[in-house]
Amino acid sequence: MILRCNLLLADSHQVKLEEVILEISATTNNNITIEQSICDVTNKAQVQDAIRKADELVPNQLQPASILVNSAGITRDGLTSNLSNEDWDSVIDVNLKGTFLMCKAFCEPNRINSLLMGSRIGGSIINIGSIVSNYGNVGQVNYAGRSAALVLFHHVNSCVQYESSTRSLLHLTLFCLYLIAFASRVP
């Protein structure tokens, strides 16, 4: 049995998005379809459009896309006394509001009902956070605040999910990463 995967990558930066697509394409076989969507996660209309595009990748559109991974994030470091309001707002908007808007669009009632009706497996939301939520980090008050808020966002949504009829079919996961190491290839 050959398993296929349809993947929609969304980012606000076209060049970076294309680089990631090339990297994934170079390391996978032909069983994956990759599409892209330019999306500012702070823009509700663009987020809804990205979710719609992901749903359209599902063969025969029998059900909506079943997995959402929220990994958008930026940093604007600075000591609290030197941190500008714009830097605070941009980190909170992208890292927290973006996660909220993506989850909200993914869990839109008609969409989620269609997902749960068409699958015995259900769906998954994976939110990527940071260990900074537990320990803080000098010069990252905005990032640490967002990370802690994301942990609470996850816990509250887990409670809502548990109380609803979707409790066994919609899985919520939060990864708080300690360190991400990036390796670059030398030609």
Image (spheres, grey):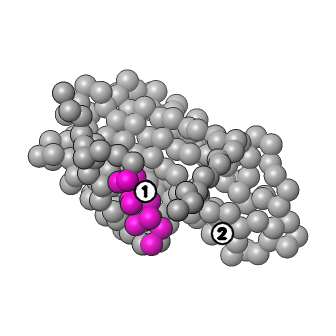
**154 within the magenta span:** no
- Where is residue 146? Give x, y as percent: 67, 54
Give the extent of the magenta segment: 15-26
Looking at the image, is mark 1 or mark 2 earlier in the sequence?
Answer: 1
Query: What element does badge 2 sit on?
Result: helix
Q: Which residue is mark 2?
A: 89
- Where is residue 95? Give x, y as percent: 59, 58
Q: Which of the pair 46/155 is nearer the observer?
A: 46
153 vs 9, left or right, is: right
The residues bearing labels 1 and 2 have C-alpha atoms spaced at a distance of 32 Å
Q: Which of the pair 111/164 is nearer the observer?
A: 111
The amino acid sitting under disc 2 is Asp
- Where is residue 137? Give x, y as percent: 81, 52
Instruction: Give neighbour class at mark 1: few <14, some 14-19, many 20+ (Cα, 10 Å).
Output: few
The amino acid sitting under disc 1 is Glu
Looking at the magenta stretch, what is its main secondary structure? helix
**Disc on res. 23:** 1
- Where is residue 22? Give x, y as percent: 39, 60
Counting every numbered tag in the picture gives: 2
**20 within the magenta span:** yes
Residue at point 15% right, 45% down? 59
75 vs 102, left or right, is: right
